[in-house]
Image: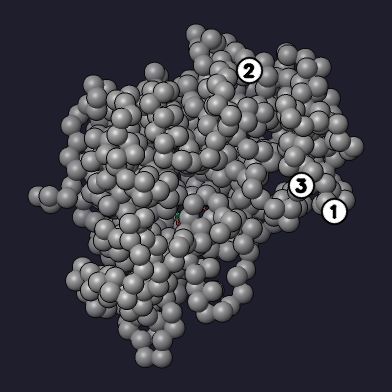
Amino acid sequence: MDPSIIRKGAAIRGVEPNLRDYESARTSFRWEDARARLSGLPDERGLNIAYEAVDRHAEGELADKVAIRWLSADGEQHDFTYARLRDLTNRFANALGELGVGKGDRVFVLSSRVPELYIAMLGTLKNGSVFSPLFSAFGPEPIRQRVESGDGKVLVTTPALYRDKVAQIRDELPELEHVLLIPSRDETSDIEGTLDLGQLLDEASVDFEIAPTDPQDMALLHFTSGTTGKPKGAVHVHEAVVAHHITGEFALDFHPDDIFWCTADPGWVTGTSYGIISPLTHGLTMVVDEAEYSAQHWYSVLEEHQVSVWYTAPTAIRMLMKAGSEAAEGFDLSALRFIASVGEPLNPEAVVWGDETFGMPIHDNWWQTETGGIMISNYASMDIKPGSMGKPLPGIEAAIVERNDDGVEVVTDDREGELALKPGWPSMFRGYLHNEEKYRNSFVDGWYLSGDMARRDADGYFWFVGRADDMIKSAGHLIGPFEVESTLIEHPAVAEAGVIGVPHRVAGEIVKAFVSLHKDYEPSKELRRELMGFARTHLGSTVAPREIEFADSLPKTRSGKIMRRLLKARELGLPEGDTSTLERE
Ligand code: ATP
Ligand code: MG
């Protein structure tokens, strides 16, 4: 038996996992049964995400249960029950109707994590309009591009964001008919060419009936993170809610009394699929924290609000690791039962650190903006192999394939290839905005090709190798950056690592690593030599980096993904391409 496997008992902190027997759940699973766990609109009028998330609870026993516990950046707490959320989203839907905004019209929201963002999203869906989130730290040009290409008719934002970023591009967006400003205590929303959202909500009726919604009606427009190139707009439909719901049950192990915290911003797909839709369809209480990350603050949120299920990302976990396990000391985190991570590969080191610090491993799962929901996951009941993404969800068929002249071929276990999925799950994207050709090219021989390289082992666990674009070809070997990065961060000095291929006359490419250090370490020639030796011992000389460069930090997307293409462009003096999602460095 491999000693590195983290064994799981049946119950965690006295709670039985939902998915007790993975194999039998896979065998018996049918999407129709998953759909039957939702209510559907009354009188067979279809399926609407907002009805499943809000109204069906507001009209039942959960009416007075807290749906959203909002923690404002200045330390206030405001609770929104399901009934109140229904009323506010009804008002929002009515306000859109009054403005002549209807089915299929696009509503963009540019805002930090304030209640109006959540109300606008759910109200938009009730109205049959399409919701598209924009990350609040975007500059004017990325906002303009997205609103323009998405045919934005309405933009909901704050007075400050409007003044700083939208006013100057407004003339270039003739299709943008209405700008609704979220009232703010410190700022007047009396700005020409805009409407006051607070006033619109006050004046709108609280009664609203959701119009018939076809499950295939477009609901969400999500732009990808831009890690590998210009962000793509992925189209999703109302039926996606079936996947949001069932993956919450299986992959995040939601139980009715859970207090859930998803740290992702709704500007990205994780922040909507799991930061809004999935927990609400389960009738949970979810914490929404407006403030930005700090280790102390995060631990205090977990303690104070008795968070039981926590969904976060590798970059945040690495920051917590950097702050040291001692930062968690003194906090009572006994309510925590399940921790999950997504967005980037989760280094084995981080899984083990979670086990040591929280008394439970961190469960990695894999999906993309395109897949709309979790596809491959480590489950509460399943033994964990640190560094593995886990196994496909019930209802999801995943394989490792190789492209050849005729199409693709499924490869045998333990071989690397492209991660592919059999289309047909409800949250699958239905198109790339204005790029039908790219959409069509993602499907070959009946498989959706993810653009990620991975392998599957003989036990059926999937292992991430790297994005196809980031793979390094050195002296006849194909090297995935993740393996090299994970080894480097096992060294006590290394906090983060980003690995690229650099052209080389003889080898084709050589492996180069950029590393940032933990707070007690300084760059030096000796440390560089030590890291080279450490990597060679663990990886062998073909895979170990030939060059290591120290960096204060690594370029990342605003959602926290290392942008290897920028490391490469800078190394080679090439144009940086689209940097709209780059975090300020
Ligand atoms: P773009 O498509 O614009 O380059 P992106 O791929 O980063 O950006 P997202 O859809 O937000 O945009 O991210 C999905 C990608 O993130 C996956 O294809 C994969 O490369 C990476 N990813 C997500 N979860 C994991 C995980 N658990 N392990 C490894 N990689 C992951
Ligand atoms: Mg992608």
Secondary element type, mark 2: helix
State the image coordinates of residue 200 (x, y, percent, origin top left). 80, 23
| Looking at the image, residue 315 lies above or below residue 454 | above
Residue under label 1: 172
Q: Nearer the viewer, residue 571 or 60?
A: 571
Q: Cα distance, mark 1 to mark 2?
A: 35 Å
Residue 304, position in %: x, y?
A: 41, 23
The disc, 1 or 3, on the residue closer to the chain's N-terminal end is 3
Question: Is the CB of the residue bearing disc 1 within 8 angstroms of ligand 1?
Answer: no
Q: Residues within 10 Å of mark 1 (few under 14, many from 20)?
A: few
What residue is shown with label 2?
Answer: 86
Q: Is residue 203 left or right of residue 184?
A: right
Relative height, residue 267 to residue 255 (above, below): below
Amino acid carrying mark 1 in the image: Glu
Q: Are marks 1 and 2 in contact (CB under 8 Å)?
A: no
> What whole-number distance in Å separates the C-alpha atoms at marks 1 and 3?
16 Å
* Mark drawn on residue 308: none
Write the residue at 48% across / 38% down.
Answer: 263
Q: Quick check: is the Cβ at mark 3 less than 8 Å away from ligand 1?
A: no
**First in residue order: circle 2 vs circle 3:** 2
Identify which residue, 562 or 385, lies in the foreground: 562
Q: Choose top left, top right, bottom left or bottom right for residue 488.
A: bottom left
Q: Is residue 27 visible?
A: no
What amino acid type is highlighted by mark number 3? Asp
Q: Which residue is mark 3?
A: 164
Query: Closer to the observer: label 2 or label 3?
Result: 3
The quadrant of the rendering that contains the C terminus is bottom right
Give the distance between the C-alpha atoms of the residues marked 2 and 3, in whole angstroms.
Answer: 32 Å
Number of numbered markers: 3
Q: Position of residue 366 (x, y in %)?
A: 40, 48
- Inspect this view and state whether residue 477 appears: yes
Residue toward you, 229 or 407: 229
